[in-house]
Amino acid sequence: MVDDDPAEVDWEEAVRMELEPDAIHESRDGYYFDCPECGSPATIDNIIEERRCNGYLNEQVEGIDFDVENVSCSAVLRLELAYSAGPESEQ
Ligand SMILES: [Zn+2]
């Protein structure tokens, strides 16, 4: 298992995917995505704050039937929000 330091990740080289509505799941603790590497839940808080999925962090998501106990994962995660503003919004 490669234990990448999130600070060392070359984000230019990272795989990117567009998020469809069905990629977002809701739990009692908030919204989460499925980790593209290990399939465990990756809560938005953990992606933004830890850059890791809950499988890597060994953090069970309440109410979700996924056992993170024996999951190992090397994925470093980041959320991006892309936007393109129209000329009329420029002041
Ligand atoms: Zn993962």
Image (tube, grey):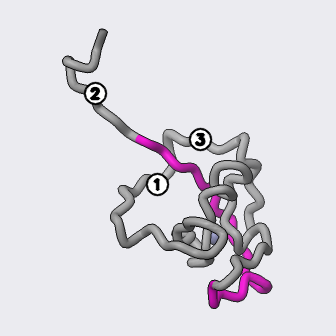
Q: Which is more toward the observer, 73 or 79?
A: 79
Q: Which is more toward the observer, 81 or 35?
A: 81
Residue with the mark numbered 2: 85
Q: Which mark is residue 50?
A: none
Image: magenta residue range: 64-81
* Kind of residue sitting beneath label 2: Ala
Q: Is residue 48 above or below residue 84?
A: below
Q: Quadrant of the C terminus?
A: top left
Q: Is residue 88 above or below residue 51?
A: above
Q: Residues within 10 Å of mark 3 (few under 14, many from 20)?
A: few
Residue with the mark numbered 1: 15
Residue drawn at x 63%, y 90% is 65
Residue drawn at x 50%, y 39% is 12
Q: Secondary structure at mark 3?
A: loop
Residue with the mark numbered 3: 10
> Is residue 64 toward the left or the right of residue 67 in the image?
left
Q: Secondary structure at mark 1?
A: loop
Question: Magenta region's main secondary structure?
Answer: loop
Establish whether ligand 1 lies closer than 8 Å to the Cβ of label 1. Answer: no
Earlier in the chain: of badge 1 and badge 2, it is: 1
The picture places residue 19, in percent across and down from the top left corner, at 38, 59
Which quadrant of the view contains residue 22?
A: bottom left
Disc 3 from disc 1: Cα separation: 10 Å
Disc 1 from disc 2: Cα separation: 24 Å
* Kind of residue sitting beneath label 3: Asp
Which quadrant of the view contains residue 29?
A: bottom right
